[in-house]
Image (tube, rainbow, N blue to C red):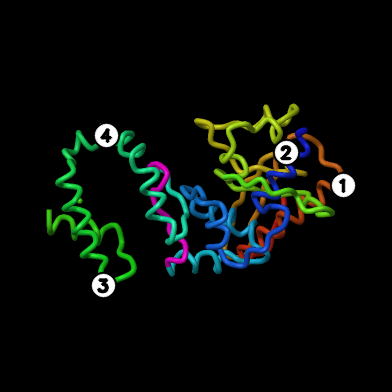
Amino acid sequence: MNSSEIVQQRLHNQRLTSSEFKKPVEVVKWLGAVQAQDFHGAKWAIAQRMRDTTNTVVEEAYNKGRIVRTHIMRPTRHFVAPDDIRWLLELTAPRVNIGCGSNYRKLELDERILRKCNKALARALHATQHLTRAALRESLDGRVHWSTLSRLPAGRSLQLANLLPAFDEYLVAYRDRKAVFEGPDGKMLNTVNGIFAPTIIIDGKLAGSWKPAKDNRSVMIDLNPFRPLNSPERLAVVKAASRYASFLGLTATIM
């Protein structure tokens, strides 16, 4: 496959070109897990893979426990579907425990202590859907702690532009990103420990970065394209920015 075919396949598999999903949990189950250390960015990542939605809809799904934000793959937070938590933990726990081993020893957390903590947490959560971290801490103190290979449907055109949040699965889910980052634009994205800032993607390829700032009525979107954009590209980016503002229920000011 050439680079153009690769990005088309990835955009389709990531449901960034078109999507049948109507609920946040459908997106999360499709992806398996969605990086969510950036809570607001992760909600936007889910929204871009749905037909039409708002921040309120995604946050409601989170507040009602239809999607769960937890430490699943490693200490980094992820959104996962409740039905998937147990098998994911069984799959990832051995590696996570190895990585956390030094902290376990430092804090003197052996299997006996961890079992007692788990029982205390289960009792605390038995009568309610959720508790704050402070409430859970009190309960402990009182007792003792992808990718599918489906083809792009014939005749399906690409969505021209996406404003992706930091940690979006379109970038972090792949070890080989040459097809997305090829050309001089790929060298202009500064990363911290390999983490990507919010990115402008045009036709599946990196074209710049962006940064939002909002108040009660509007969101200012600072665009930083890495090259001059032609008129269709500029229009597509403006459309993507407007979609982001609609997601927030705000008006957009584009810089």
Residue corresponding to mark 3: 127
Give the spatial CA distance, label 4 vs label 3.
Answer: 32 Å
Tell which residue pokes out farthest to the bottom in this image: 127
Residue at image position (30%, 64%) is 131
Query: Is the N terminus in the top left, top right, bottom left or bottom right quadrant?
Result: top right
Residue corresponding to mark 2: 6
Q: Nearer the viewer, mark 1 or mark 3?
A: 3
Q: Is residue 127 magenta?
A: no
Q: Which contiguous range is marked in magenta?
A: 65-75
The mark found on residue 101 in the picture is 4
The answer to which of 36 and 84 lies nearer the viewer is 84
Give the spatial CA distance, label 2 vs label 3.
Answer: 49 Å
Regarding mark 1 in the picture, which secondary structure is present there?
helix
| Residue type indicated by callout 3 | Ala
Regarding mark 2 in the picture, which secondary structure is present there?
helix
> Which of the two discs, 1 and 4, labels the residue nearer the N terminus?
4
**Which quadrant holds residue 27?**
bottom right
Give the spatial CA distance, label 1 vs label 2.
Answer: 25 Å
Figure label count? 4
